[in-house]
Image (cartoon, coloured by chain):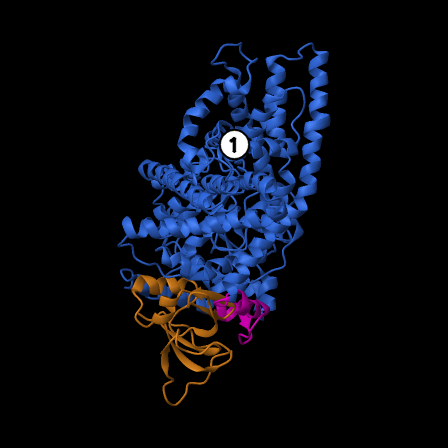
């Protein structure tokens, strides 16, 4: 038995994503390895989560999974005995002839050209509504002597479309067991476990002999033979009524229409941000009051009891961690609402249409329409978005897309937008936030055009062939699961890298540069302020050359949430006698912009927002770029982001100042 | 190169006595049904289309014109979005309107 072990089968672990998948634990050594394979959007990750209790990101669009997932699946065999397997969730692949890097791993695993051995058994997840394209992979796998099981999903969608699949006839024609199941509703898992346990005990079936010889050197002839075999199988197992327009078709006529489609897309996204900011505002205020009031007071009381009142430890905990991280945690309701709304859009199948709608804009910058999918992922988090560039077949398209992803406005930046918009534009906060997302799209198009006219003048165009999923009613479980995965990752960021950053900023604020003792220095006399003042000179032409503001931006290089925490702890340390309520923080920020802008506050705020949007998102994104496109392109990307951000911010302020 | 679809589909139409007109997918009216011809597509692109079910002889219906000038196609239960250039290069032997 050849086992694909965790150390060799999985690709290099990527940079930590702020909203990515939770890592799945591998099974014990010695247990059989089973791989879930199949065409994109067949339901592999949903099945994987259902079987392992994992929390892989799922979505109703092709290309959701680009990393290999691994987890332990403990089912029961026919005798009721526990049967454990090490389960792999592979990126979607139509065949073993890879067209892009995300398909390459699957091909290497089964053709033996990769570093790992083949799994003991492959479960081909086949979408009953699109069976022909799922079975092409089965045809290829059957040409080798391998243990296979076919998991038939989406029978409900097939039924609605007039397609009936006879699972028994299909199993007989394929020569492998077929199990019908519904991973979204978690039905059929026990049968799959029993069938997999049986198949693992049985010898591998003999390889399928090709029906036509002498065509091995002609890829199209070989493919033709496989399609013929698939068609023969379908003739015995599938009945379908003549195609007729479905609800999805009727909806798509409007959703993808030339003018209405893009307008509808913008309207939907505006609705998401407007609903997010409106619904979350009272919850956020209540949490902010809780943190700055009772929580801070209780902390102060505890330090009094311990006799540590006024100590550096109290400063670190109350002015640093409670003020900084506490302020960030008030954004949890906002993030949860936005993640839930985006999960609904993903699960419904709507976001897959966005790639079609934006194809023209993508082509204008020299990218194929499916480059929009990684860019859409970037609006959640840039790190998985850079990994998602693997769905693009052309290396130059991958590099260009990976350079553009940081200009998509991730959800971490949303926290700062909301605070700034609520401070300076309280009656139109949702519209301002939406405007930032539109600006983000303009950055992607503008920088893309600039790259195309300079570095990528000869890049070719890839055809867009987008396999659109049917619309489906989102399930509460999947929406809640996807929302929780992302909120948990947000909390993890707040509890990990942000706590470390807050501690470092506190340390820098505790070091005096003009006399005084450690931990007892006003923030403006600290090493943090001195260093920030040096950098702040660069931002005087942009109207926000204030050390508080620039210090927060420098800290934000680590992660964008840190901009907020840095502000909160700097202003909290300035008045250590009381907690910092959200409205007090807003007043401090307002005063800083008023002082640094020379009266053109709105222009300075817009310049700040533009800089925040365009400069380097976080160190994890740079690490992901280094992994995907190499250190030189990653360094080029950082330089590009800083140059673009500073230039546009200065232009916005200078033009805005003339107009006000 | 054949990549032909099997002829035993229940919804296959009778072979007409005179050959049906061959036109670019981008030129036929919305709602047109017919069978697919690959036109001037390179082999790699043809194989890529075949993987999602668009093969010579596959029954297709043009469902909609999309933003950017592309087309939304139905082949069986599958819905495929194509960009404008690919739609222009694919040909359809049209059998009429409506699916």
Residue A456 visible in image: no
- Quadrant showing the N terminus of chain B: bottom left
Q: Quadrant of residue A489?
A: top right
Q: Residue at x 58, y 60 (%)?
A: A154
Question: Looking at the picture, how far across and down is residue B61, in whole percent?
Answer: 47, 74
Looking at the picture, tell me which residue is in the foreground, B67 or A449.
A449
Relative height, residue B1 to residue B22 (above, below): above
Q: Is residue A245 magenta?
A: yes
Q: Residue at x 54, y 52 (%)?
A: A59
Relative height, residue A186 to residue A248 (above, below): above
Relative height, residue A359 to residue A640 (above, below): below
Looking at the picture, tell me which residue is in the foreground, A29 or A390.
A390
Looking at the picture, tell me which residue is in the foreground, B88 or A172.
B88
Chain letter matching colour blue: A
User: In the current view of this chain or complex, which residue is farthest to the bottom?
Assistant: B17
Q: Is residue A463 left or right of residue A192?
A: left
Relative height, residue A134 to residue A450 (above, below): below
Looking at the picture, tell me which residue is in the foreground, A1 or A635.
A635
Q: Secondary structure at mark 1?
A: helix
Chain B, chosen colour in render: orange
Q: How many marks?
A: 1
What stretch of residues is rendered in magenta? Answer: A234-259
Question: Looking at the picture, how far across and down is residue B16, in whole percent?
Answer: 41, 87
Q: Residue at x 59, y 22 (%)?
A: A574
Please name the residue that numbered disc 1 is placed on: A595
Q: Is residue A335 magenta?
A: no
Label 1: chain letter: A
């Amino acid at each position: 038995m050849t086992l694909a072990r965790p150390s060799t089968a999985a690709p290099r672990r990527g940079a930590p994503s702020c909203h990515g998948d939770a890592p799945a634990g591998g099974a014990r050594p010695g247990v059989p390895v089973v791989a879930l394979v199949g065409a994109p959007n067949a339901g592999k990750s949903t099945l994987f989560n259902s079987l392992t209790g994992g929390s892989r990101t799922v979505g109703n669009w092709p290309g959701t999974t680009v990393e290999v997932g691994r987890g332990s699946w403990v089912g029961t065999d026919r005798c009721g005995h526990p049967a454990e397997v090490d389960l792999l969730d592979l990126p979607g692949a139509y065949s073993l002839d890879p067209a892009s890097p995300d398909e390459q791993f699957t091909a290497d695993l089964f053709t033996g050209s990769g570093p790992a051995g083949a799994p003991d058994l492959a479960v081909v997840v086949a979408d009953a509504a699109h069976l022909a394209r799922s079975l092409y992979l089965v045809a290829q796998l059957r040409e080798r002597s391998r243990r296979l099981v076919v998991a038939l999903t989406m029978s409900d969608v097939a039924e609605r479309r007039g397609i009936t699949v006879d699972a028994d006839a299909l199993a007989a024609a394929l020569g492998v067991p077929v199990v019908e199941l519904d991973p979204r509703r978690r039905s059929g898992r026990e049968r799959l476990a029993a069938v997999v346990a049986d198949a693992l005990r049985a010898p591998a079936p003999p390889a399928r002999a090709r029906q036509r010889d002498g065509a091995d050197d002609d890829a199209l002839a070989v493919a033709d033979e496989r399609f013929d075999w698939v068609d023969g199988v379908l003739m015995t197992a599938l009945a379908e009524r003549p195609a007729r327009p479905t609800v999805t078709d009727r909806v798509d006529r409007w959703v993808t229409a030339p003018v209405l489609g893009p307008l509808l897309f913008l309207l939907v996204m505006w609705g998401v941000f407007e609903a997010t900011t409106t619904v979350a505002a009272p919850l956020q205020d209540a949490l902010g009051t809780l943190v700055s009031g009772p929580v801070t007071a209780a902390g102060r009381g505890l330090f009094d009891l311990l006799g540590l009142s006024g100590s550096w430890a109290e400063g670190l905990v109350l002015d640093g961690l409670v003020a900084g991280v506490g302020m960030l945690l008030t954004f949890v309701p906002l993030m949860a609402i936005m993640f839930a709304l985006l999960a609904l859009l993903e699960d419904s199948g709507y976001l897959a249409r966005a790639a079609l709608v934006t194809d023209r804009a993508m082509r204008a910058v020299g990218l194929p329409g499916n480059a929009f999918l990684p860019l859409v992922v970037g609006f959640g988090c840039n790190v998985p978005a850079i990994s998602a560039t693997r769905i693009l077949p052309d290396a130059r398209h991958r590099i260009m897309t990976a350079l553009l992803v940081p200009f998509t406005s991730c959800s971490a930046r949303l926290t700062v937008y909301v605070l700034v918009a609520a401070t300076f534009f309280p009656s139109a906060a949702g519209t301002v936030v939406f405007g930032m997302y539109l600006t983000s799209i303009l950055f992607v198009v503008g920088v893309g055009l600039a790259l195309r006219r300079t570095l990528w003048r000869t890049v070719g165009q890839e055809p867009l062939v987008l396999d659109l999923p049917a619309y489906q009613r989102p399930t509460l479980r999947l929406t809640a699961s996807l929302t929780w995965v992302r909120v948990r990752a947000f909390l993890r960021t707040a509890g990990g890298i942000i706590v470390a950053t807050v501690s470092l900023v506190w340390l820098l604020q505790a070091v005096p540069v003009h006399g005084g003792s450690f931990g007892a220095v006003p923030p403006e006399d600290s090493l943090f302020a001195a260093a920030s003042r040096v950098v702040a000179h660069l931002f005087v032409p942009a109207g926000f050359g204030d050390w508080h503001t620039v210090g927060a931006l420098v800290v934000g290089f680590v992660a964008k949430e840190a901009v907020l925490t840095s502000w909160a702890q700097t202003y909290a340390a300035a008045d250590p006698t009381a907690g910092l309520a959200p409205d007090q923080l807003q007043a401090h920020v307002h005063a800083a912009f008023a002082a640094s802008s020379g009266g053109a506050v709105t222009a300075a705020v817009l310049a700040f927002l533009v800089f925040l949007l365009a400069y380097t998102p976080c160190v994890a994104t740079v690490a992901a770029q280094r992994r995907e496109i190499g250190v030189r392109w990653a360094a080029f990307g950082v330089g590009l982001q800083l140059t673009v951000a500073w230039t546009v911010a200065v232009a916005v302020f200078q033009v805005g100042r003339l107009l006000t | 190169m054949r990549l032909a679809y099997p002829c035993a589909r229940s919804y296959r139409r009778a072979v007409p006595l005179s050959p049906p007109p061959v036109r670019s997918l981008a030129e036929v009216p919305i709602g047109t049904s017919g069978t697919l011809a690959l036109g001037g597509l390179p082999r790699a692109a043809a194989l890529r289309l075949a993987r999602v079910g668009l093969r010579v002889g596959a029954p297709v219906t043009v469902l909609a014109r999309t933003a950017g000038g592309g087309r939304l196609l139905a082949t069986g239960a599958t819905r495929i979005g194509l960009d404008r250039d690919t739609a222009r290069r694919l040909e359809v032997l049209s059998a009429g309107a409506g699916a």
